[in-house]
Amino acid sequence: MPTWRPDPTFYPSARMAMQAPPEKLAYVAMLNVEPQARPDALGVVDVDPASSSYGKLVGQLDMPNAGDELHHFGWNACSSALCPHTPHPHVERRYLIVPGLRSSRIHVVDTKPDPRKPQIARVIEAEELHHRTGYSRPHTLHCGPEGIYVSALGAPDGGGPGGIFLMNCESFDVLGRWEVDRGPQHLAYDLWWHLGHDTLITSEWGTPNMIEDGVVPELLLAGKYGHQIHFWDLKKRRHSQVLDLGAEQQMVLELRPAHDPTKAYGFVGVVVSLKDLSASIWLWHRDGAAWAIRKVIEIPAEPADPDALPPLLKGFKAVPPLVTDIDLSLDDRFLYVSCWATGEMRQYDVSDPFNPRLAGSVHIGGIVRQAGHPAAQGPLNGGPQMVEISRDGKRVYFTNSLYRSWDEQFYPAGVRSWMVKLDADPAGGIRLDEKFFLEFDPAFRGHQVRLEGGDASSDSYCYP
Amino acid sequence: MAHLWPWAALTGLGAFHGINPAMGWLFAVALGLQAGNDRAVLRAIPPIGCGHAAAIALAVAIVALARPALDPILLQVLAALCLIGFGIFRLLRGYRHAFRVGMVAGFGDLVLWSFLMATAHGAGLMIAPLVLALPLAVAPVPATHAHATVMAGFGGSLDIGLLAVLVHTAAMLAMTGLLAWAVYAWVGLSVLRRGWINFDVLWSAALIGAGLVLLAVAVSEFPAPDR
């Protein structure tokens, strides 16, 4: 039902969204890893420091089927509803769209009657998605001008091309394939945009066949995983430019454009370089009429005793950082970088996007480091992975699982899954919140976190 | 004096259309903020006016063409049904947007955007009852002079119809310009968070209400005893 006033969680600009009240709840995707699989779940975490259940799981919605592999998810509507050219401000931010990355099933979860007890409102089966779009393995989604944009890794047979499809933000009907002309684009992963410049950007991982049984060393060493980003005309739905980072830059994943729509630049993380196992962050930016890209951060691999390494890495005698997620604060000032394999969360000051400055670092988990947490006993594994920043930029949440079959390759002992929180100093610097350590039931692994009312990767803005 | 009220109502509806952020003032503000100067706000106003005027002119032209050809009461009933039907359709339809104009918008883009937004929201339809009430120069048509009279009547409707479009658009543009300037230079966009009430519901109510009034008038005039 339409409302009389805009949803109070919609803000015209990222600047105004930073004034939003602190979140009290977080939602987290929970992947079930029991041999006799039970369904995955959406967890509800109390993040209100004044509450007696602070840092604890206070709700859990089991999915209707087993084997979904919940991964990323997002809201049906967000601040982009206030955009002047495509206004729809009286739609509520109420439903979480929760795709199963393996099952291709899309769950619509209603958070309204009781935010601590979300309920399934609708389930879209894989067949319907295939029939309407030709795509499968829905991955990342964003609320935008024409509704909900969802990236998909590939076709129902596990091959390519991957792409984008659209969903209606009120009925949740799958509307169809987004692209009119995909040009040379074949691999898919993330999508986001510069709304002020009518430009959509996509990145590359691999087709379902290239990832679902784990990373394939032969493909990796041959540079076959994604190493390009694509620019599209958001309104004409046409491919306009491709930027190749070079085949040695394997897996170009999370896209974080500046939140201010007047700024035409953004950051993208590369998981691993074949040259030296380093990870890197690249800055795309406007260069005349076209887009250009350059490496602005490089994080080296750390030498390690082969005995401490999983079979996949023994021969290299080093731990690659494996940057698997990045996130940009709403003031476009701090970029958080997850180094999943070395067990480090880095904070960079990117006030000057061409010259990032390391402003903070926290160690937790890691293949070799296995750094602990003040509130946890003993060493921890897994490493900083899906990271989410509160709208005011003061709190940072993250979990430690990547993707089931990849978890097993890098952490063969099994990932003991946790969610932690950092406190961020407005002037730079981060530290672990000693009171916040959520250890998941051993049957589950936490993945993406979404904050009540929106966070630093859920909304887009049309005004500076 | 009795015929002044449609003009007053046309002016009032112009201001009512102009207040709606979806009709253009907000786009003008956004373009100003994106460009970082107030000239961009000013530049956006004329094309927004052109598009709105075109949408209104289309509705006036349809009425002007239909008027000589149809029985007046039948025309009123048809117009009333269109208003009520479109109002209900708008209420039930939910958000759907064909994205034809982006944030990088030139003069032509803004004309097209404004025309599409006004038409899709039923701006032209909303003023149709007023155009029907205007004293257009259409006399009862004696069979012998049918052709000449229709042409004369059509010419008269053109003048008055054009005036109707201009009066309405001037009021709409005045409100658009005023709000765009006030929000850009003074109030700020935070006003959107509470102030952007649901104009879609208001518009649907206005369309349905106008349709019901028109229907009532048509019914009260039927059967016309001596016309």
Image (cartoon, grey):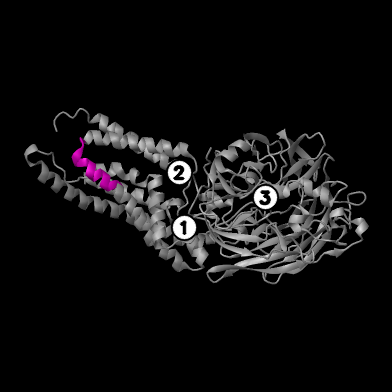
Tell me: residue A56, above or below residue B173: above
Give the residue number, with chain letter if any, for mark 2.
Answer: B200
Chain letter of the residue carrying label 3 = A
Callout 2–callout 1 Cβ contact below 8 Å: no
Q: Hey, what amino acid is under mark 3?
A: Thr
Q: How far apart are the two marked residues, 3 and 1, measured between alpha carbons?
A: 40 Å
Q: Secondary structure at mark 3?
A: loop
Tell me: residue B69, above or below residue A200: above
Work out whether disc 2 and disc 3 sit on a shared chain.
no
Q: Secondary structure at mark 1?
A: helix
Asked if residue B203 shows in the view, the reply is yes
Q: Hey, what amino acid is under mark 1?
A: Phe
**Residue A402 screen position, x and y as percent:** 77, 50
- Count of numbered circles in the view: 3
**Horizontal relation, residue B31 to residue A44: left or right:** left
Chain letter of the residue carrying label 2 = B
Main secondary structure along the magenta-highlighted residues? helix
Closer to the camera in the image, A245 or B66: A245
Q: How far apart are the two marked residues, 2 and 1, measured between alpha carbons?
A: 17 Å
Quarter of the picture holding the C terminus of chain A? bottom right
**Residue B68 screen position, x and y as percent:** 18, 41
Does residue A160 belong to the magenta stretch?
Answer: no
Q: Hey, what amino acid is under mark 2?
A: Asp
Q: Quadrant of residue A43?
A: top right
Q: Residues within 10 Å of mark 3 (few under 14, many from 20)?
A: many
Closer to the camera in the image, B92 or A256: A256
**Residue A197 screen position, x and y as percent:** 53, 62
Boundaries of the magenta span: B59-71
Give the residue number, with chain letter if any, for mark 1.
Answer: B27
Give the residue number, with chain letter if any, for mark 3.
Answer: A207
Closer to the camera in the image, A344 or A130: A130
